[in-house]
Image (spheres, rainbow, N blue to C red):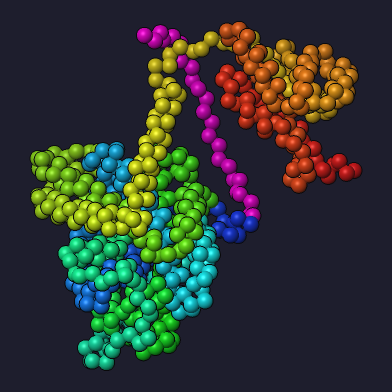
Amino acid sequence: MVRRINQEKKQTPIIERSTDYKPRRTFRSWLIGRPLSTADAAHETIGKKVGLAVFASDALSSNAYATQEILVILAIAGMSGFQYVFPISIAIGALLVIVAASYRQVIFAYPQGGGGYIVAKDNLGEFPALIAASSLLMDYVLVVSVSISSGIAQISSAFPIVYEYRVAVSVAAVFLITILNLRGLRETGAAIIAPNFFFIFMMFITLGVGIFKYFTGSLGTVTNPPEMIHLHDTVAIITPFLILHAFSSGTAALTGIEAISTGITAFKEPRSKNAAITLTWMASILLTVFLGISFLATHIQAIPSEYETVISQIARTAFGGQNIFYGAAILGTTVILMLAANTAFAGFPRLSALMAKDGFAPRQLTYRGSRLVYSRGVIALAFLSAVLIILFQASVTRLIPLYAIGVFLSFTIAQSGMAIRWWRSGKLSLEKETVGNYSTLRYDPTWKLKMALNGFGALCTAVVMVVFAITKFKDGAYIVMILIPLLVAVLWMIHRHYNKLAKQLSLENFGVIPPQTIRHRVIMPVSGVHQGTLSALRYARMLSSDVTAVHVTIEPEDAEKTRKKWETWGEGTRLVILDSPYRLFVEPLLKYISDIAEQRQPGETITIVVPEFVSDNKLTGALHTNTATILRDQLKLQHGIVITNVPYHVHESEARH
């Protein structure tokens, strides 16, 4: 039972002031642009064309390796297996349409963004939401790793000398894209819109020329084909499981479809409408290009290889060699593959910030940098992606097994959540609606059709996920199956920590004001007696009349010098000299403070006043031992002790005169 004290309400003065301070221009300003004010946020939103460039790069770029992944699996059965490439691609295209339709529904149902994470949290609960979020976060990291590695593979197809340096070049590319994204979403979109549309233009030209030559009988097959990737020493037969395996590998074409639903808030008003139109554009272009590549790859007898990509073989065959048109096609593909990482840089920071706001990720991720982007999320994504590229030596084939499981796990959870949402909608009456934290649920007359669509889509993506887990388990899929539960556990522990802290800091039922301090004791560590020490001593005497200076003896002669100076300058303040035969400074001081803290009386406050030397020159400042920082880091772990630093500023320019 908490006893409340009734006090006369006093009017609390609250003063609001505006400031005209502007950050100084530094090297950082030159690198990522001038700082933007919070009021500029409304002008940083993007339209449909820029949105296609920013959020669709990943999905469009997957055309560069999706067909090749199908060929890699079918190569187990030899050249005879390649006849199944186009039928498998048609089945993948049908699944693409279902998933795209599902995420269009997500966009209108959850206009504040968040994608599968918010869908799962609203319809399935916190635990499935964390699984979806973990899958998406891993997906975004792998998007950067896979797309950059694939882009460098395109360059090495045209210039084989690059292959030897692919890891270093890939890491450098990650760094450049990171800098670009730190400049802000609108500026990033403006920079990549031309390369994106150039890729789309070149793909349609390449496929158009290739299909025209096919129907006129002048297409031919690949000349000087590269050496085929052999996954097994013996040729296997075509089985339903092999077809399903190839289908699951080719579904890499679907990656990136969810990105727009995560970043709806980046679009101009009306946000949901603009985001949905952009998603439709993206899905249409993706479907057309993917089917076109698969069709031509079959008829030119393209070979899956680490040394020349399928796109390179198609362009070389369609344009009759490595001419200027071939170079333009390879350039466009390379650029889109590298810019595909931009989709992750747009999605990862937004999702992590949303999770941080809900208390499932470090709060620091909610911070918007000087360019109104979640800069800490951008940097975290860049670091994790670079590590993966180095560990897997920028190999697309080795990275893909890690990639797909997380993607399709998030697809499955999101579509399952939407299916449950439509079932909940069908239970409402016509005039009733349910207002939730993330959306408003109303009766939908077509709820049965939508529920069936999402349910079927969830079933298909779940099957793909299971096939991937089985067939790619030894190739690295087991890593994802371990990492996702670990990441979920970490996110849950973060959430528990924030909840526990919030309860401890809560003002609810905080009705009794703690008793006032009846005694204040001050302890001041002294390494030597100088002007900085006396400045700290004057401050300590202002806090309390009970001040104790403590000197730790490292060398006996130094202790005698300190004793004599203190007798002259100590103003009658008592000095405790601690002998330290092993020349330790921090440990004896901490032991002394701990002993004093154990003996203190109720209501007694202990303050440690730490003199700190501060130089206006960073180079000369590095020549001094930062004892104050060491003490602060150690003392802050002790309960019931206040730590106060008293800086003593030394100006190098004044000291020289």
Asked if residue 247 can be seen in this view, the reply is no
* Residue 468 image point, x, y percent: 27, 57
Image side of residue 189 versus residue 527, left or right? left
Residue drawn at point x = 28 percent, y = 63 percent? 249
Instruction: Tell how many labels.
Output: 0
Does residue 202 belong to the magenta stretch? no
Image side of residue 47 versus residue 635, left or right? left
Image side of residue 599 versus residue 462, left or right? right
Does residue 7 belong to the magenta stretch? yes
* Residue 59 image point, x, y percent: 33, 64
Residue drawn at point x = 47 percent, y = 67 percent? 191
Screen quadrant of the N terminus: top left
Which of the two residues, 150 or 278, is positioned nearer the viewer here?
Answer: 150
* Residue 254 image point, x, y percent: 28, 62
Vertical order, 245 against 160 (above or below): above
Screen quadrant of the C terminus: top right
Q: Quadrant of residue 486?
A: top left
Asked if residue 424 can be seen in this view, the reply is yes
* Residue 292 image point, x, y percent: 26, 76
Which contiguous range is marked in magenta? Answer: 1-26
Image side of residue 204 versus residue 569, left or right? left
Residue drawn at point x = 19 percent, y = 69 percent? 238
Which of the two residues, 119 or 22, is positioned nearer the viewer here?
Answer: 119
Considering the whole magenta stretch, tell me its main secondary structure.
loop
Which of the two residues, 126 or 1, is positioned nearer the viewer here?
Answer: 126
Residue drawn at point x = 76 percent, y = 47 percent? 619
